[in-house]
Image (cartoon, grey):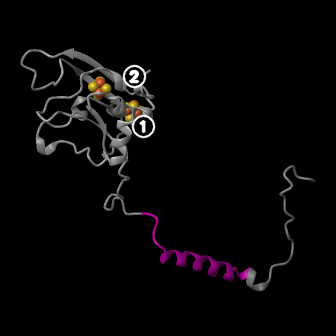
Amino acid sequence: MQSLTNRSKQVSNKEMTLLERAYLPAILNGMMITLSHFFRKKATIKYPEVKRSFAPVYRGMHVLKRDENGAERCTACGLCAVACPAEAITMVSAERKTGEEKLFREEKYASVYEINMLRCIFCGDCEDACPKEAIFLTDRIVPSDTLRERFVYGKDLLVEPMEESKRVDISKRQTKEVLEFKKNKELQHNRLK
Ligand code: SF4
Ligand code: SF4
C-alpha cells in the first residue's frame, strides 16, 4: 500500500550471516562507541560540588537595596509593579513617622513588598522601571521548595541586611553595557508614556 509520506522502506528478508547471528560485531561496535566516550571532555559537572560560573548579566533573585546610611530606598511608588509583565509584585505603602528617617529614605515606604517567584520571569523590567535604584536582580538563585506559598518572597527575604558587611553586591551585574543601557532613555523598552 502506498504510504502518505512516501518515506516507508522495504524490510530486507535476507538471511543473516553466521557472524550477524552471533551479534558479536554489533556488540563490539557498541562497546567501541561507549569506550570512545571515556576519552571525551564531559558535558556534565558534579553539581553541587562543582558549580558553573554564571554569565555577568545573569538575572536571579531580587534585592531591595538600602542607601549608604542603611535606610530602605523603596518609596512604594509602584512603578516596578506596573512594569512587571508577570504581575508578580504587590505592595502596601505606608507613611514614614517622625523618628523613622533612619529606616526609610523617603516619606512613603513599602510596609509590605512581595514578589511571587513562581510568576516572575526574571526579565529585569522592575529594575529598569525603578526611579530610586531600590530594586535590583542579583546573581543569586531562588532556592527550590516544595510548597507554593513559600515562593512569595516578602521584605524579610528581599531587603538586604542593615550591616555593611552583609549588603548584597550588585556590581557584578551592573556592567558597563548595562549602565549605558540604563542611561539611554530611547532603549528603555518599558518606559511609561
Ligand atoms: S523580574 Fe520581571 S517578572 Fe520578575 S518581578 Fe521583575 S518585572 Fe516582574
Ligand atoms: S522598588 Fe522602586 S519602583 Fe518599586 S515601588 Fe520601590 S521605589 Fe518604586
The reply to whether residue 118 is visible in this rendering is: no
In-image side of 101 versus 19 (left or right): left
* Mark closest to the chain's N terminus, 2 or 1: 2
Q: Nearer the viewer, residue 117 or 66?
A: 66
SS for dot 1: loop
SS for dot 2: helix
| Residue type highlighted by circle 2 | Val
Tell whether position 97 is magenta.
no
- Residue at 29%, 49% (x, y): give it: 172
Rounded to the nearest angstrom, the CA distance separating label 2 from label 1 is: 14 Å
Q: Which residue range is magenta in the image?
A: 21-44
Mark 2 — residue? 82
| Residue type highlighted by circle 1 | Cys
Using the rendered view, name the quadrant where residue 61 is placed: top left
Q: Residues within 10 Å of mark 2 (few under 14, many from 20)?
A: some
Q: Residues within 10 Å of mark 1 (few under 14, many from 20)?
A: some
